[in-house]
Amino acid sequence: MATVRALLDVGIARLRESGSETARLDAELLLAHALDTDRTAILAHTDAPVGDGAAARFQASLDRRAAGEPVAYIRGIKEFHGLAFGIDPRALIPRPETERLVELAELEIVRWLLGAPRPAGSPPVRVIDVGVGSGAVAVTLAVLLRRRGMLDEVTLAATDLSEDALQLARENAVAHAVGDRIAFSTADLLPGSETTRWDVVAANLPYVRSGAMPTLPVATSYEPATALDGGPDGLTVIGRLLDQLPDALAPHGVALLEIGGDQEAALRALVIERLPGWSCEVERDLGGLPRVAILRRDETDAASPAA
């Protein structure tokens, strides 16, 4: 009977040979998955024997990973902002850099709720996640606001054009006990409404240039192309959202848009073209790359009755 250490050695070698840049981590996660435990446990017990059934499951997972399939799809789970999300090919795998989008959205909501006295009977802060995918952004926001005791003061909505992605997002919302706190709907970006104005718009939309799609790692070929391909310049979908913001964003509202690390200049130019007078700040991620654009109306527009 093989031990944990022996199986890991074989798995690491196999994945390195296949070209994995994270062969050790991948092997540890996949063996833990085969044993129905966590990575910490197997690293603490490397001499433990592994039964034939678990060893066979591990080998099958290695085959899938060596072929390029993402570890998250093999395990069916991905950690995001300290939470576990069910993940499968219905939606894009949540990336660590998107956690910055969630952090900024949370800060904006808290600013709305605590920045100035709110008269009794004030409407809830209206927040929407555009292109919800797996639900990572919307569900994490709901969980964070619940921890702060603010969830009852917020209305959360989420949209996606993919019915499959919406279903996955609903499943993750239910798993984190916020299924009844997020209104999911099918829409091409923002839902059509002449009356609803959003205080906070958060969006992680496709921003990969079409020409760069074939150069992405093999693992991304397992993800929905429509969740990655942002058109010739990577900003086609984001540009369509910019066009919707004047009618959809509340006065003094904010839109938070995740962008590619090399798109700051192009995004700023697009904002000047599509939203003249609006401010555009860009926050960086932990790697120092431009990651989230923060858009607000100009003060004159926000103060006007028609805004």
Image (tube, grey):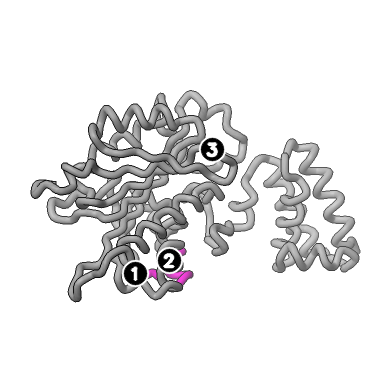
Q: Does the CB distance between marks 3 and 2 fall below 8 Å?
A: no
Q: Is residue 185 left or right of residue 93?
A: left
> Which residue is nearer to you in this view: 167 or 245?
245
| Residue at x 48%, y 41% (from the top left corner) | 291
In this view, the mark in front (3 or 1): 3
| Residue at x 51%, y 53% (from the top left corner) | 99
Whether residue 186 is visible here, answered yes or no, is yes
Compared with 298, 82 (above or below) is below
Magenta range: 172-179
> Which residue is nearer to you in this view: 81 or 73?
81
Compared with 14, 42 (above or below) is below
Residue 181 is marked as 1
Which secondary structure lies at badge 3?
loop
Compared with 100, 281 (above or below) is above
Q: Amino acid at mark 2?
A: Ala
The verdict on residue 259 being magenta is no
- Residue 177 at what x, y percent from top left? 43, 73
Q: Does the CB distance between marks 1 and 2 fall below 8 Å?
A: yes
Whether residue 164 is visible here, answered yes or no, is no
Disc 3 and disc 2: Cα gap in Å? 30 Å
| Residue at x 58%, y 59% (from the top left corner) | 79
Residue 206 is marked as none
Disc 1 and disc 2: Cα gap in Å? 8 Å
- Residue 297 at what x, y percent from top left? 24, 43
Q: Is residue 80 left or right of residue 56?
A: left
| Label 2: few (<14), some (14–19) or many (≥20) C-alpha neighbours in 10 Å | many
Compared with 181, 279 (above or below) is above
